[in-house]
Amino acid sequence: MNRPYLSRVASELRKNGHVVIDGRPCKIVGRKPSQDTISLEGIDLFTGQHHKCTVSTDETVDVPSVSRTEYQLILIDQGLFNLMTQNGTLKDDIKVPTGSLGSNISSDFNEGKDLLVTVVRAMGEEQATSYREA
């Protein structure tokens, strides 16, 4: 299994990249360098919460290993997706997201649409983040 994060020098971080802030995997949405420090603002990949930190430019920071996998939606059962990879491997431990994303996926699936669900994985967490019609 891959390490949940890599180490990088803070000065190498860029907007739209990833960083661990407050122990959470975040997408960098703001980066403000000053003479000796960099202020970072990130959005948690799974909760959407904003996190901020300031680090020295030469400080080593954690960058989460983030992967995205697209699965075919086979079934929705008791609040969980039954998903299948392109090679036929089944996955049944991803929760149907709350809010409009989960409602839209469920509605389209119940209408008989063939759907592909994107699951993001970082630091041991996985979550469905988007979908499209196959």
Image: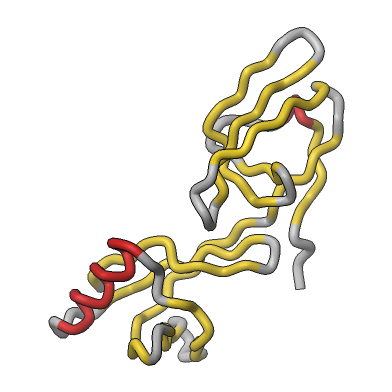
Q: Nearer the viewer, residue 120 or 52?
A: 52
- Establish if 16 lies above or below 82: above
Question: Which residue is pictured at 49% across the width and 49% down the height?
Answer: 48
Q: Quadrant of residue 12?
A: top right
Does 130 sit left or right of 120 as displayed?
left
Does 121 sit left or right of 132 as displayed?
right
Question: Which residue is pictured at 43% across the width and 84% down the height?
Answer: 80
Colouring method of the image: secondary structure
Task: Give the percent coordinates (x, y) of residue 27.
Answer: 56, 43
- Establish if 20 lies above or below 3: above
Instruction: Identify the image quadrant of the N terminus.
Output: bottom right
Question: Which residue is pictured at 25% across the width and 73% down the height?
Answer: 134
Task: Give the percent coordinates (x, y) of residue 81.
Answer: 41, 83
Question: Which residue is pictured at 77% across the width and 30% down the height?
Answer: 10
Q: Nearer the viewer, residue 131 or 51?
A: 51
Residue found at the very far top of the displayed protein: 35
Does 100 sit left or right of 25 as displayed?
left
Task: Give the percent coordinates (x, y) of residue 113.
Answer: 18, 79
Task: Give the percent coordinates (x, y) of residue 33.
Answer: 68, 16
- Establish if 29 lies above or below 39: below
- Establish if 33 lies above or below 61: above
Residue found at the very far left of the displayed protein: 111
